[in-house]
Image (tube, rainbow, N blue to C red):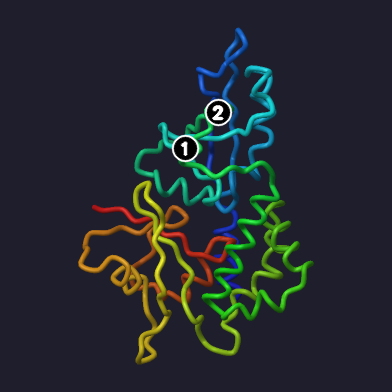
Amino acid sequence: MANDREVLREIWEGRLPVCFQLNSEETYSLQAPDAYYLMVPRLSYFPLVTDKVRKHFLKYINPEKQEAEMWLDFNGQPLRWHYPIGVLFDMYASDIQLPWNITVHFDKFPEDELLHCPSREVVESHFMSCIKEADVLKHRSQVVSNMQKKDHNQLWLGLQNDKFDQFWAVNRKLMEASGEEVFKYIPFRCYRGDGPFVQHLVRPVTEEGQKKTLHHLISEVFPNETDLHVMTHGIEPPWETPLQWLSEHLSYPDNFLHLCIQTS
């Protein structure tokens, strides 16, 4: 288990260098602002790490827009704030050079493509709903329903404040197979291009009780397709990796495996 904890910590400490630049059309001052650079956690969400970015650019935009909601794009594609940062990076990894250049906007919010995020409470609500959905799949909701409000708060504060020990003190309960050796179903989402993610009901073992692997999952979700590459946390896990192990160790804090699918 000590080695497993090292895997969890390595995943937790994943960072990405990002260069934030204000959309040139929204520069209101005579002088264009400098870019703002940050190392951001892969496991977090953009609204949790961009307060300083907003503050940096506010003085350069139209005063009438200073209360507007900030949103981000990469290569003209609005970035969905409710996807973890690492998932967004892996979705577009083939087009990205580091640092990741992201454009900041305060105008022309893309209503048809993005959800509004007026506050951190909206992120918390989304995050907790994902935790609950994952627990329904894994434990028929038995773990979350037995948690107290302070446990929910500890999960959220651990993620928000980047506190590994605080988060995992509670999350380990969600990652236990509760008396059985495996989860009922594996919580996962597959991303391909800019379309909506795909998720199916996939068990971690076959009807004969054999452990399923990543290869089984991809074959069930994308039958008759070959030459697919699966990326999560910036790596391609081996096809023979057991699903149960993947779920316990490579899930994001929302308790889902987020798998980005690319074709050779």
Q: Quick one: label 2, few (<14), some, or many (20+) residues within 10 Å?
A: many
Residue 136 lies, in percent from the top left, at: 56, 75
Of all residues, the one furthest to the bottom in this rendering is 208
Residue at (66% x, 41% y) in the render: 118
Determine whether 42 is above or below 61 in the image.
below
**Residue 161, label in figure:** none
Which amino acid does the dot numbered 1 rest on?
Answer: Pro
SS for dot 1: strand
SS for dot 2: strand
Q: Which residue is mark 1?
A: 78
Determine whether 66 is above or below 160 in the image.
above
Q: Are the residues tagged 1 and 2 within 8 Å (C-beta)?
A: no
Which amino acid does the dot numbered 2 rest on?
Answer: His
Left or right of 171 in this view: 192:
left
**Residue 105, label in figure:** 2
Mark closer to the chain start, 1 or 2 = 1
Residue 57: quadrant of the picture:
top right
Determine whether 175 is above or below 222 in the image.
below
Residue at (31% x, 58% y) in the render: 229
Residue 217: quadrant of the picture:
bottom left
